[in-house]
Amino acid sequence: VIASGSRFTRYSAMEVTVEPDGAVLIEGLRTEILPSTTAGQNDPPPEPSVAAIVTKWEAAVDEALGDEIGFTVAGLPMGSWALANWTTDLTLAAFPGADVVISNSGGIRDDLAPGPITIADVVEALPFDNNLYQLTLSGEGLRQAIGAGMWACGGVSCFVTISGARYFFSDESWQIARPDGTPFGDDEALRVVVTDYMWQGGAGFGILAELD
């Protein structure tokens, strides 16, 4: 296993020796993690056949995902509550029978720059092909789920995104309430929308499958 980091700052190089019969010689294995060149500086010219494939698919993507579907004056930065709230509010609007939507902020992977918003912009900001699950949780269960997600990510540039409710830390534990501040009952049944990634335990939400 070779882990070379993220955002193409480094890449992994591996050389193997293969016998004529297809056997890979372990003693001939060599691995190395190398820094990537800075974009535009000392980059080798693109291989023509690969560049042609990239150009073809860039044009296809632009045609398929280039439609403008919205506009933002100031932009919505990745890691901001503005973008997080926008994504969960849209999800709640798509599930009129749901009470609350929670998600993990790590699922947002890009800004929405000022100006027109295209489908491609949304795909870049939300690149994961998640399924959405509607669960039934008690008020206490929702509080536990939010607490688990917040403790797992630390709450620095990572947080639980939410719509239909708000949460806060008080009396040494996470508390939840409706947007107007009215608390949920501990035994109140709530319809909560989450991603399949969260339900399967991602981002510290392993408790969801137990509570549902």
Image (tube, grey):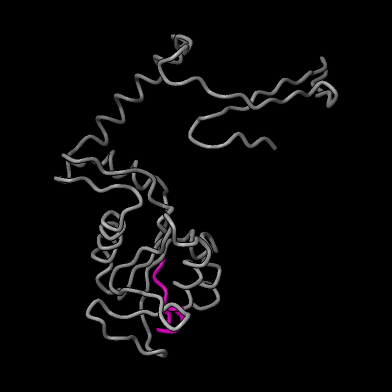
Dividing the picture into quadrants, the one containing residue 185 is bottom left
Closer to the camera, 151 or 202? 151
Q: Residue 211, how many percent across, how many down?
A: 51, 78
User: Which residue is painted at 33% across and 48% down in the image?
Assistant: 78
Stretch of the chain drawn in magenta: 133-143
Residue 136 vs residue 202: left or right?
left
Q: Residue at x 25, y 76 (%)?
A: 179
Location of residue 56 in the rendering, given as x and y in whole percent from the top left corner? 34, 20
Asked where in the image residue 101 lies, by quadrant, the reply is: bottom left
Q: Is residue 156 above or below residue 120?
A: below
User: In the figure, 79 relative to 189: above or below?
Assistant: above
- Which residue does the image show at 54% across and 72% down from the upper left? 207
Name the outermost residue toward the front. Answer: 171
Residue 195 figure quarter:
bottom left
Q: Is residue 164 above or below residue 37?
A: below
User: In this view of the protein, which residue sits in the foreground, 197 or 8?
Assistant: 8
Percent position of residue 44, x then y: 48, 10
Q: Is 14 in the magenta?
A: no
**Relative to 45, does residue 64 appear above or below in the rendering?**
below
Whether the magenta-drawn stretch holds residue 141 is answered as yes
In the picture, measured across the screen, residue 29 lies left or right of residue 38, that is right
Total count of labels: 0
Tell me if 135 is positioned left or right of 114 in this view: right
Pinpoint residue 89: horizontal percent, then vertical percent: 25, 63
Quarter containing the N terminus: top right
Report the front residue among 147 and 117.
147
Q: Say whether residue 18 is left or right of residue 60.
A: right
- Name the residue located 56 percent from the left edge and 28 percent from the top edge: 10
